[in-house]
Image (cartoon, rainbow, N blue to C red):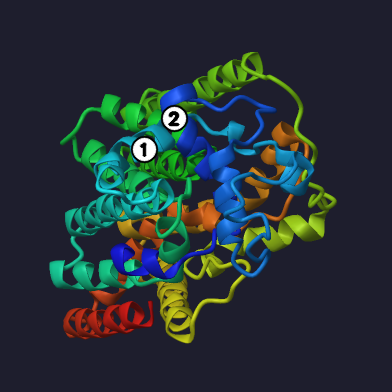
Amino acid sequence: MIAISVPQQEELSPFDEYVYIDYLAKVPTQLAVPHGDPTGEYARSQLDCRGVVVLQPESPACDTGRTQPATAYPLTGKTSADIYTPIYFAVTWAAAQPLVWTGVDLTDAGRIVGGLWLGLGVVLMFLLMTRLRVPPLLAWGLSVLVIASPAVHWANGYVSTDAPTLAVGAGLGLLAALVYTRKASMLWLVVASVVGVLIKFQNIIAVCLVVIVFVVLAVRDTLERRPGGWRQGLRMLVTDRLVIGAAVALGSVLVAQVVWMLARTAMTVGTTPRQGVDTPVSLTNLLRESYNFLTKTAIAWDGAPPAPVEMFIGTVLVVLGIAGVVGMIFVGEPRSTRSLVALSVLVAATLSAPVLGLVLAVVVGEYVPLPPRYGMSLLPFFILCAGWLLAQRTWTSGVVAVGASALLVASMLHA
């Protein structure tokens, strides 16, 4: 899918791909990009010669052998990618080198590596669903639908820090399931949480969802053991392995993020102008954020509208996600693991966007309405709930598998 789409995408993505390409190109010489760092000649020439989808055409400076003055570039030629650790960029750069050695441009090679990130994410999502008893054929069909979605097109078809997000969300979900059934150590979940959030801070949404699920299940298990009083019940709850693990995971993530912020401050080489796209923090804007992820993540476009087939696929996934999350809350047995997980997903999807918006406003100094793609780490859980709901009828597996295959082919032909 990615190998077919990349050659058709000459322009840069409007989702900051210009500064991501700059970061990618600087991996072998700088590893990390400091705050205030000017973008390099490679990224500027890519912007000049490729332009940006919808926003900016090719520059007259293309192929002149020199780039334009710094003031001609976004943020007066400064990077805005310094908020990210080098993990995604270093791994992507290393994986792209075999393609670069064969003559593929670094930008296109980095985009093609998005297919590896996507493959990892889809495999982990499939394993998550089958581990939690979604029929394999149905899980396969739902995974194929995700591959064909516009969310994947933007996240994995370009150089983007969103490329690993599907794998982070699905991986954390799978590890949480294994930890709950005592098939894996809590240490693996803690390590994966830290790495996932260091790749991109927005992935903390998936960590918080796992924390919510663990706490909710621990409360249920405590109530079922019928403690003698509220003090005994509280003692049982705070000493529950799931609650302790959730606290350690969340605490480790926050400590790691603070360490990175301190390191980023120490590396500062200058200032970066404000992007000038911030909006006031208001109750109305925060309420809008509350339904952002559940209703828009699978479509996740901003700028160039997706093609009709992509819009249809994204809409199908959104409908399935909403139906699965809401449906399993009421269809599942009271206090069943499935219904409680679905409830936790709904809570996380509703609260995470406004809370994340406030956190970013404090940390970055600007509040910007969150792009739906920031909720990509929740997509595996939306699809998991959809799988549980669809599995109530045995005939759905074949229908979803055949329909998803046809839509994947249609999306590839469009690309």
Question: Can see residue 166?
Answer: yes
The picture places residue 316, in percent across and down from the top left corner, at 42, 80
Task: Name which of mark 2 and mark 1 comes first in the sequence.
Answer: 2
**349 or 18: nearer the viewer:** 18
Q: Secondary structure at mark 1?
A: helix
Residue highlighted by disc 1? 93
The picture places residue 194, in percent across and down from the top left corner, at 41, 28
In the displayed structure, would residue 244 be above or below residue 171?
A: above
In the displayed structure, would residue 183 be above or below residue 413?
A: above
The picture places residue 38, in percent across and down from the top left corner, at 66, 32
The tag on residue 27 is 2
Q: Are marks 2 and 1 in contact (CB under 8 Å)?
A: yes
Q: Residues within 10 Å of mark 1 (few under 14, many from 20)?
A: many
Question: Can see residue 229?
Answer: no
**Amino acid residing under circle 2:** Val
In which quadrant is the C terminus drawn?
Answer: bottom left
Question: Quarter-wise, where is residue 264 in the image?
Answer: top right
